Amino acid sequence: MENKKKIINHFLEKDFLISENLLNKIISTNIDYESFDKKENNIILNEDIYSHFEDNNINGIDWKEFEKFKVLDEKGKNKEIYKKFLDMLEQEEKEGIEKKIEDIEKGETKRVDELESNSNKYKKEEGNVEIVFSYDEKSKKRTVLDFVNYFRSRFKQMEPMFKSRLNNNPIISINKIKIKSQNDKISLIGIVSNISLTKNGHIIIELEDLTGKIKILFTNRSENNENYEKAKEVVLDEMIAIEGTIGQNNEIIFGDNILFAELSLIKELKKSPKEEYVVFIGDPHIGADMFLAEEFENMIKWLNGDLSDNKKIKSSNDELINLNKEEEEKIISKIKYLIITGDIVDGVGIYPAQESDLFIKDIKKQYDVFAELLKKVPSHIKIIINAGNHDAMRIAEPQPIIYKEYAEKLCEMTNVIMISNPGVVNIGKTTEFEGFNCLLYHGYSFTYYADVIEDIRSKGGLTRADLIMQILLKKRHLAPSHGSTLYIPDSEKDNLVIEQAPDFFVTGHIHRLTSISNYKGISLLNCSTWMGETAFQEKVGLKPQIAKLPVANLKTREILIFDFEKDKEDVENE
Ligand code: D5M
Ligand code: FE
Ligand code: ZN
């Protein structure tokens, strides 16, 4: 009894309460408790943590949190979290990255950064993310009126983008053409309701505003060649302005010029005073047989500082780059953001007979597996996710965030931020710096423009995401033609209009990597995929570019590509 009191008092002096089981253990095993000289505020020391306290200099652990977990454990409410905490302490003693990798390979789901052996980890600075725009659907029935108002809302939203730039002729509404005279010079702003070719190859664009419709002729005669080329870029339903001359009977306009909505030209890239990095992943397609698990895991290991994978590093102009170990580690340590642009999972029932291409046939399980993978990403990295056409969400755009019922585990992660498709997030904002706006769009409309715009079709179609992205920025709309995507009309706002110039325009869907550091002050990025070539892609002749990780430096705006694709030879030798 005396002994018991002595032991209890020894720990009380250090502000520790000691648990019954530890007390008994100290008595029965003669532990040299007197050398225990840590001091902590009123926590109950038990058998599980005693040795950790004794052996280690454990810094930065929130013991109050720990107490809560322990109580939950004792009440039988949340045993898991207490066990994880103990595992983490256990891990403190096993140094080195090898152990972490072993865990990843074993598929254990402890957060890798929690396992890191140096105590800095608890203080690692997190990225700063603010949601600028994420579509949140108010559920209501759509009516015909919504479609009419949708036209109006696009018109009203985009009209100001043209007005200040039409300085040559008076701007008039279409119903006022009839009170003007032949040969008068006018400007019109409207939505393209029809495009046709005359038998001589002239282009006739029918333009509609809130007051009427009129035909505008663009001839293919040489002196008008530039405008004729512009007319070839015009697509259905987009909003344009024209300058022209009134023709015979005021029934047709001869087009002198076409203006697209255009973003203003910014040559200088905005740069952060802080060296931070953002990395981009597109189209992982979890659940598909073709998902590249090994490449994906190698990439995650890399995010955790493992440089063992023998990868190529390239600049955005495709030049090979050599980085030494220190340079590479420095980059990794400053990665704060991970952006993922949709087709998170392969889904279920997305296309006929998809079942036979699926490794995981349950959509919720597909998301669960993805969450498990993402838990291995260091938790100070903020992960931003939007939906694609394979995800658990209606395919009509704007797509709200992926259904929580399916992506439950993803939504629970404190470093995961779900946004709509399209959506805008700001990253890297500080008190002194405004941060970067990133426009995320999965890219479903891209296939339409690859095909319909002759200039893009002739230069490589779908392989030219760079051209598609530029033309959509020029039109300031992610899917100007109604036929290019399914869309949900919103009578208040056309949510696919590009209202503000972003700093990053990030897309996916076509499974090929494109990176342009500076288009009008915007970094353009179409992401690679983490899925191999499918039978469908082989049939349509689209070669995916797989397992490439673009890494953008926010201080210099340089983009490097880390290539995790395995060499063909390696694959063949396996
Ligand atoms: O799209 C994967 C790839 O397949 C992407 O490059 C676009 C292409 N794709 C998808 N659907 C079509 C259609 N209907 N026509 C042409 N090309 C298409 P994913 O969304 O991952 O299935
Ligand atoms: Fe995809
Ligand atoms: Zn897609």
Image (cartoon, grey):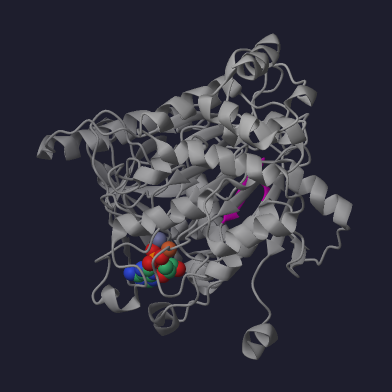
Looking at the magenta stretch, what is its main secondary structure? Answer: strand
- What residue sits 46% from the left and 81% below the top? 541
- What residue sits 41% from the left and 35% below the top? 186
Q: Nearer the viewer, residue 502 or 302?
A: 302
The quarter of the picture where the N terminus appears is top right
- Does residue 245 appear anywhere in the picture? no
Q: Nearer the viewer, residue 420 or 455?
A: 420
The quarter of the picture where the C terminus appears is bottom right
Q: Is residue 363 above or below residue 128?
A: below
Q: Is residue 61 above or below residue 304?
A: above
Quadrant where ligand 2 appears? bottom left
Q: Nearer the viewer, residue 424 or 530?
A: 530
Q: Position of residue 16 (x, y in %)?
A: 63, 16
Q: Position of residue 288 (x, y in %)?
A: 40, 70
- What residue sits 64% from the left and 26% below the top? 429
Q: Position of residue 308 (x, y in %)?
A: 76, 65
Q: Is residue 524 magenta?
A: yes
- Does residue 188 appear anywhere in the picture? yes
Q: Is residue 428 magenta?
A: no
The picture quadrant where one finds residue 182 is top left
Q: Nearer the viewer, residue 500 or 392?
A: 392
What count of labels does the image hold? 0
Q: Residue furthest front?
A: 1
Q: Magenta segment range?
A: 517-526
